Amino acid sequence: GQQLNQSPQSMFIQEGEDVSMNCTSSSIFNTWLWYKQDPGEGPVLLIALYKAGELTSNGRLTAQFGITRKDSFLNISASIPSDVGIYFCAGQPYLNAGGTSYGKLTFGQGTILTVHP
Amino acid sequence: DGGITQSPKYLFRKEGQNVTLSCEQNLNHDAMYWYRQDPGQGLRLIYYSQIVNDFQKGDIAEGYSVSREKKESFPLTVTSAQKNPTAFYLCASSILAGGYEQYFGPGTRLTVT
């Protein structure tokens, strides 16, 4: 099946630093989504991207839908301690005409972010 | 408030027992999904359902069963046939249009001893 390669697997940064993470795929995606999961909780949707080249911000978070439609990037500026958690990318694969996905998403393996005060 | 509820938050069972995890949504979403998450790992799809009385196996359906008798409810049964049932279980829902954004419940942590 489709796979997403998310990197880095983990990051240890100082408060105030900027963070970058990305997801890549060997196939084309129609939609890219970025989620954050706090320990012991369900993932929360941060940003949704729908068009190649699209750049969207949500506060200190900025995400981009890659031009090739095979990758996406998430940046966090001026990190704070509450940014700690696991960040997941997810995508809706492009299907050939007549295909149906029932809304299934492909998820990356996650980036574990630790922020030191 | 609209959202997805999962109950209970923590569940403990003895090996060999079946257990049912609850998932309810009041978002009027068409589709619902069950995922399993193991420590340090991503999300793996167990089952999903597009409409009432219809559901499809995901990537790791063995040892699990589901039902979709109502649009708002999608319970998951972890059977005794599931060899490693201890995990964090997440339920999600989405509309079947646009970007297919999935919204997640708070999860149920199941421990089987």
Image (cartoon, coloured by chain):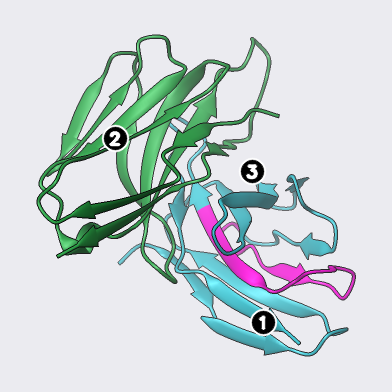
Chain colours: A green, B cyan
Q: Which mark is residue B50?
A: 3
Reply yes or no: does residue B91 show up in magenta: yes
Instruction: Estimate how packed mark 3 is, as few (under 14), some (14 to 19) or many (20 or more) residues with alpha carbons within 10 Å.
Output: many
Query: What span is colored magenta in the figure?
Result: B71-92
For disc 1, the marked residue is B111
Tell me the subunit letter for badge 3.
B
**Number of numbered markers:** 3
Residue A32 position (above or below residue B74) = above
Reply yes or no: does residue B31 show up in magenta: no
User: For residue A72, which quarter of the picture?
Assistant: top left
For disc 2, the marked residue is A74
Point out the image quarter for the N terminus of chain B: bottom left
Tell me the subunit letter for badge 1.
B
Question: Residue B8, can we see it?
Answer: no
Of B95 and A49, nearer the camera is A49
Q: What is the distance, in whole Å, between disc 3 and disc 1 at their CAs? A: 29 Å
Q: Where residue A27 sits: x, y (%)?
A: 57, 16
